[in-house]
Image (tube, rainbow, N blue to C red):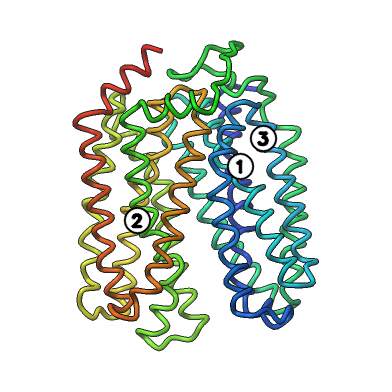
């Protein structure tokens, strides 16, 4: 097979798997009311079911990243797909709230192994000239999965009950696992098989790092620390919008639950899908041979996103609020699409999955905390007031990436090139 084609086939396959990954995790929210009625779950149990996935996913992500740096990433991806598909299938057979809670915990364990391995495998097969594009396409798959999973589960719930959606998604995952088994690259070492500027030559095998040594390696690179802090800031705001925006539209504009749900998700995800695709392409073009300019691109995008949240200091109309959220999400995602690319540019390939796992954990924990804080703050300041103050998270992210661009990234790229 032509090497260029095989690299882009890998991106296409992993994008489909990424969409399924996020569809499986997001399907639950679309049928929450049906589950409450069918399983007679208490409010406390519903809260536990709703939050179990994100907490387990966050806690297990670092370990899954370390695991993917020590084993062939293609195999980690394959077994992760099989495991979460079986769990999704079994979710449809849950008879009690406790069984559903266990299923959501198992889904967190099985899905957290996918992203670190998939990002690292993509980076290994795509050199600097196409790396942002390749990873950006996969990010678009994640956001598309949120829309498809919620939409399909909601439709299925209205017509056949909440269980069939999980059965169909589980079977679909097992089917794509069969395709992945025969078409994913048979890498024998985690670093992949194609030289990429920061990874090893084909056929070489660098010994895996012990966890503490891997941590020292990652946190010894200043740019990694900056990207980790920046992505954590932005993730807090992103989770707040994802969880609370439908309620804001419902209360502020007296929309129905269906209309509020669509207003609060479709705009966000459309902006995120578009920006994920555009962000990688624009970043590759903007940076060219000077990869340090990726952070300058991030800085510009974060700065552009800030003014759109200030409209919530007033009483925006539905059209103004919707447009502001869409444009904020677009510019934020343009910037964030470069996070994993930069991590792979500055770190040795032996710790790529570990770095993505730690980043996922930090982002999810920050998001969970921010969502809970919003619940407490909205009584005093309203959701609009909370949304307005989120411009501070974008401002903090802009400051961080500017510091990285001016003081650390170029040096870290030079060190990576000399390894």
- Is 57 situated above or below 345? below
Quadrant for the C terminus in the image: top left
Residue 203 visible, this angle: yes
- Is 349 situated above or below 171? above
Instruction: Please give the name of the residue rendered at 72% of the width and 68% of the height, measured from the top-left corner.
Output: 98
Q: Is mark 2 in CB contact (under 8 Å) with mark 3?
A: no
Q: Position of residue 105 (x, y in %)?
A: 66, 57
Q: How far apart are labels 1 and 3 at the CA level?
A: 7 Å
Q: Position of residue 310 (x, y in %)?
A: 21, 67
Q: Mark 1 — residue? A: 114
Q: Mark 2 — residue? A: 330
Q: Is mark 1 in CB contact (under 8 Å) with mark 2?
A: no
Quick one: which residue is furthest to the bottom in this view?
A: 254
Does label 1 or label 2 sit earlier along the sequence? 1
Quick one: label 3, few (<14), some, or many (20+) residues within 10 Å?
Answer: many
Q: Mark 3 — residue? A: 76
Based on the displayed image, in which of its 4 quarters is residue 145 positioned?
bottom right
Quick one: label 1, few (<14), some, or many (20+) residues within 10 Å?
Answer: many
Q: Position of residue 93 (x, y in %)?
A: 80, 66
Instruction: Please give the name of the residue rendered at 37% of the width and 51% of the height, measured from the top-left corner.
Output: 333
């Amino acid at each position: 097979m032509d090497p260029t084609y095989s690299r882009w086939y890998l991106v296409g396959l992993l994008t489909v798997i990424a969409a399924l990954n996020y569809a499986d995790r997001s399907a639950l929210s679309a049928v929450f009311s049906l589950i409450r009625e069918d399983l007679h779950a208490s409010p406390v149990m519903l809260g536990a079911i709703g939050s179990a996935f994100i907490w387990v996913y966050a806690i297990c992500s670092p370990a899954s990243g370390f695991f993917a740096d020590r084993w062939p990433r293609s195999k980690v991806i394959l077994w992760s797909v099989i495991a979460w598909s079986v769990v999704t299938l079994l979710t449809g057979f849950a008879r009690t709230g406790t069984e559903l809670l266990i299923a959501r915990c198992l889904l967190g364990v099985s899905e957290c192994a996918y992203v670190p391995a998939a990002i690292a495998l993509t980076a290994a097969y795509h050199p600097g000239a196409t790396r942002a594009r390749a990873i950006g396409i996969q990010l678009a798959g994640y956001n598309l999965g949120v829309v498809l999973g919620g939409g399909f589960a909601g439709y299925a719930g209205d017509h056949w009950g909440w269980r069939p959606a999980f059965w169909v998604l589980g079977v679909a995952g097992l089917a794509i696992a069969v395709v992945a088994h025969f078409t994913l690259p048979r890498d024998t070492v985690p670093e992949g098989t194609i030289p990429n500027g920061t990874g090893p030559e084909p056929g070489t095998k660098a010994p895996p790092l012990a966890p503490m040594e891997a941590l020292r390696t990652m946190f010894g690179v200043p740019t990694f620390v900056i990207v980790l802090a920046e992505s954590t800031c932005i993730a807090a705001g992103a989770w707040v919008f994802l969880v609370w925006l439908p309620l804001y539209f419902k209360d502020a504009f007296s929309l129905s639950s269906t209309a509020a749900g669509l207003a609060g998700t479709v705009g966000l995800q459309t902006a995120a899908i578009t920006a994920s695709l555009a962000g990688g392409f624009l970043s590759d073009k903007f940076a060219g041979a000077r990869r340090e300019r990726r952070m300058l691109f991030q800085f510009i995008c974060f700065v552009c996103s800030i003014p759109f949240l200030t409209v919530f200091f007033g009483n925006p109309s539905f059209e103004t609020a919707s447009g502001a959220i869409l444009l904020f999400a677009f510019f934020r995602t343009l910037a964030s699409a470069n996070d994993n690319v930069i991590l792979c540019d500055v770190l040795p390939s032996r710790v790529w999955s570990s770095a993505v796992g730690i980043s996922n954990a930090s982002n999810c924990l920050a998001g969970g905390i921010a969502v809970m804080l919003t619940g407490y703050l909205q009584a005093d300041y309203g959701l609009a007031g909370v949304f307005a103050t989120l411009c501070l998270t974008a401002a903090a992210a802009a400051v961080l990436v500017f510091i990285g661009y001016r003081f650390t990234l170029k040096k870290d790229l030079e060190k990576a090139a000399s390894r």
